[in-house]
Image (cartoon, grey):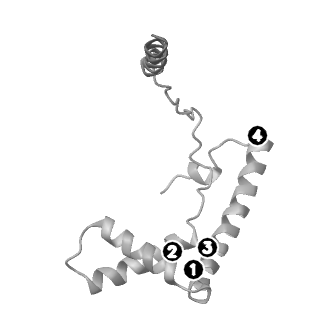
Amino acid sequence: MKRSARASRFNSDKRAKTNKEPKSKEKKKNDKFDANKPKKPPTAFFYFLDDFRKEFQEQNPDVKSMRDVGKACGEKWKTMTYEEKVQYYDIATEKRAEFDKAMAEYKKRKESGIDEESEEDWEIDG
């Protein structure tokens, strides 16, 4: 009798857990999207992906699936040495420096209270 009581209590605990409502992850809504905010630059891998995709398409014109291209690219990136990756790291570092500079300017403009729209946007062609 003790066994069946334990078993039923154990089963009821399981049922109680499964009856709970699943936790929903609330997405943060960014109500104030700023179009003038600089975008983050891609990483070194994405610069490599851009070059690799062109070469891969030339060598394998029959492969159309982005999944296959991405998989081949990832495998190639993993096997590359640091010396082979340096050119892509250099590009990414340059772009990151440009981004940091643009972000600093953006923050200055935002802190000083200047309108989001710059004067260049208001020029009239003619």
82 with respect to 114 (left or right): left
CA–CA distance between discs 3 and 2? 8 Å
Q: Are marks 3 and 2 in contact (CB under 8 Å)?
A: yes
In the rendered image, residue 95, in percent from the top left (x then y), is placed at 63, 70
SS of the residue under disc 3: helix
Please state which amino acid type lies under the numbered disc 3.
Answer: Ala
In the rendered image, residue 114, in percent from the top left (x then y), is placed at 73, 43
Which residue is under mark 4? Answer: 113
Of 34 and 49, the residue lying toward us: 49
SS of the residue under disc 4: loop
Q: Nearer the viewer, mark 4 or mark 3?
A: 3
Please rate how many residues cluster around mark 1, counting C-alpha atoms within 10 Å: few if below 14, some from 14 to 19, many from 20: some
Residue 56 against residue 116 in the figure, above or below: below
SS of the residue under disc 2: helix
Quarter-wise, where is residue 28 in the image? Answer: top right
Pointer 3 or 2: first along the chain: 2
Q: Are marks 3 and 1 in contact (CB under 8 Å)?
A: yes
In the rendered image, residue 98, in percent from the top left (x then y), is placed at 67, 68
- Seen at 54% across and 32% down, the residue is 29
Residue 47: assigned label: 2
Q: Nearer the viewer, mark 2 or mark 4?
A: 2
Pointer 2 or 1: first along the chain: 2
Please state which amino acid type lies under the numbered disc 2.
Answer: Tyr
Please state which amino acid type lies under the numbered disc 1.
Answer: Tyr
